[in-house]
Amino acid sequence: MLLIALIVGCAAGGVWLFTHSARFGALPQGEHLERLTRSPRYVDGEFRNELPTPILTEEKNMIATYAEFLFSRPEGLTPPAPVPAVRADLKALDPNEDVLVWLGHSSFYLQLQGRRILIDPVLSAYASPVPFSTRAFSGSTPYAPDDLPDIDVLLISHDHWDHLDYATLTALRPRIGAVVCGLGVGAHLRRWGFAEERIREGDWGDAVAFGALTVHVTPARHYSGRTLTRNKNLWAGFVLESPQRRLFFSGDSGYGPHFAELGRRFGSFDLVMLDCGQYDRRWGLIHMMPEETAQAAQDLHAATLLPAHAGKFAIAYHPWDDPYRRIEAASRDKGYRLLMPRIGEPLSLDDPIPRPGVWWKTGGKSAGHATP
């Protein structure tokens, strides 16, 4: 019995030490906690969505759902061949040119109004606390942190592992000028060595100006938490507004009236990058089905839609290419253009938008693009 107790105690201690390691981040404390409690979205010790949004819409609990995913994985979750990505010299790009580079999943590099912007960067080969889980598809990680230029503005939509990556951010930390994130997310960054004065935490409706570029913190329909402790910091999307362009990144979000509200508030968007992957009917309120993504693009009065949250990780039960097949079908005869570039492919926002890419169909090059 003593031996069993010792083994159990050691195991429990090991788990405690692991879950309290730096990569798990930290929760808001002190004056930072006091500030977020003043948010109208902070109720009874946690943040809440504008609409009732349970994570699971079925009776089955989260642990049972995860177990089903781990032990009964369907076919087609990963590509049969390496993803055909591009590795360009991002440091050689003209900083005065407005450029978009999709880095896979929900990670983006942008140049806008002379600023270098990085969104939810996950450049690691996995998106979880451990390297053997949630592995990136073969070929989908063409860039390392050292391949990126110095970053003026880092945007973090929320703290889930596939959006807030400890290894990527600690490697980039000396070369990041400012961070914009939702209330409470800064606690993770402070633990990871980011200086207080570089972190701008915002509530939905707040805005931060960087010269002629304004970043608006916008609503999303999701949740937060890197452990079983949830909703202690705020999830968000971002509007990036310059005198020439208006872009929108949804972050992770289920469908809701906030898209139409943003469409009314801002009028229209040149480009929207919307949640379009890792969906399932069992968590249908926190991620959009591709058909809902198409509707959200219309609600936003978008000229161009780029589907995100797909193409790199398998975090749901659908085939890896299901988001692309369904969004292509759902976008027929819509008022926006559909943009599906290869991972790592620099696109000038001044150039005519190419026709939809077919890299996910053929394993070859995207149609309408030249290899850099």
Image (spheres, helix red, strand yellow):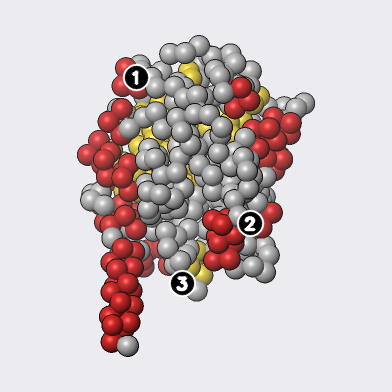
Which is more N-terminal, label 3 or label 2?
3
Residue identified by numbered label 2: 283
Tell me residue 303's x, y (percent).
63, 26
Q: Is residue 371 visible?
A: yes
Tell me residue 44's x, y (percent).
50, 74
Relative depth, front residue between 1 and 247: 1
- SS type, badge 2: helix
Tell me residue 257's x, y (percent).
67, 50
Compared to 112, does 351 lie above or below?
A: above
The residue lying at 67 percent from left, 69 percent from top is 59
Q: CA distance from mark 3 to mark 1?
A: 46 Å
Q: Quadrant of residue 359?
A: top right
Q: Are marks 2 and 3 in contact (CB under 8 Å)?
A: no
Nearest to the eye among marks 3 and 1: give it.
1
Nearest to the eye among marks 2 and 3: give it.
2
Q: CA distance from mark 2 to mark 1?
A: 39 Å
Residue identified by numbered label 3: 45
Q: CA distance from mark 2 to mark 3?
A: 23 Å
Which is more N-terminal, label 1 or label 3?
3
Which amino acid, by three-letter code, is at mark 2? Trp
Which amino acid, by three-letter code, is at mark 3? Gly
Tell me residue 211's x, y (percent).
36, 32
Residue identified by numbered label 1: 89
Question: Farthest bottom residue?
Answer: 1
The residue lying at 48 percent from left, 58 percent from top is 224
Question: Farthest top residue?
Answer: 370
Which amino acid, by three-letter code, is at mark 1? Asp
Which is more N-terminal, label 1 or label 2?
1
